[in-house]
Amino acid sequence: MDITLWVIQVILGLAFIMFGSMKAFQYEKSKASLPWVKDSSKGLVIFIGVAEILGGLGVIVPQATGILTWLTPLAAVGIAVIMILAGGFHIKRKENKAIWLNLIFLLLALFIAYGRWFIAS
């Protein structure tokens, strides 16, 4: 189970670091590739990007270093909250393709949170 959790943590963490970096540091590229960015303020997009980077780091680094390992499931819960909010936002905008990705990331984040708090702790 620990190996499965690690694989999912790395996939989810790297995905969030990658997507978050694009939003936080490449606003114009985000604006061109993500339709919702055009309708959102630059500050909000950068905030979301930074939150995603921190969440991505949070699901990997504490568990990998063995320091403050309780932060890993907490970061996974944070990612789950971001995905719930993003899903609601995309439902409102009728962006159905994005909703499926939000749902997949939500389920992976919840699996990490549950696995690290209750199964592999």
Image: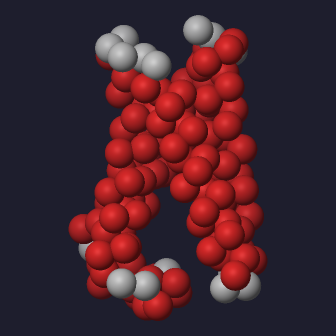
**Percent position (x, y) of residue 118?**
68, 14
Residue 30 spot, x, y in % from top left: 39, 78
Residue 95 occupies which quadrant of the picture? bottom right
| Residue at 71% across, 52% down | 104
Residue 29 seen in render:
no
Q: Pick whichever, 62 or 77, lies toward us.
A: 77
Image quarter of residue 29: bottom left
| Residue shown at 37% from the left, 38% from the top | 57
Image quarter in which the N terminus is found = top right
In the rendered image, residue 90, in percent from the top left (x then y), is placed at 65, 76
Q: Please state which of residues 85 and 115 is positioned toward the viewer in this rendering.
A: 85
Q: How many marks?
A: 0
Quarter holding the C terminus is top right
Using the image, determine if residue 109 lies above or below residue 99.
above
Locate residue 6 relative to residue 56 in the image: left or right. Answer: right
Residue 25 in the image, given as x and y percentages of width and height: 24, 68
Quadrant of residue 27 within the rendered picture: bottom left
Instruction: Tell me which residue sits at (62%, 74%) in the image.
Output: 89
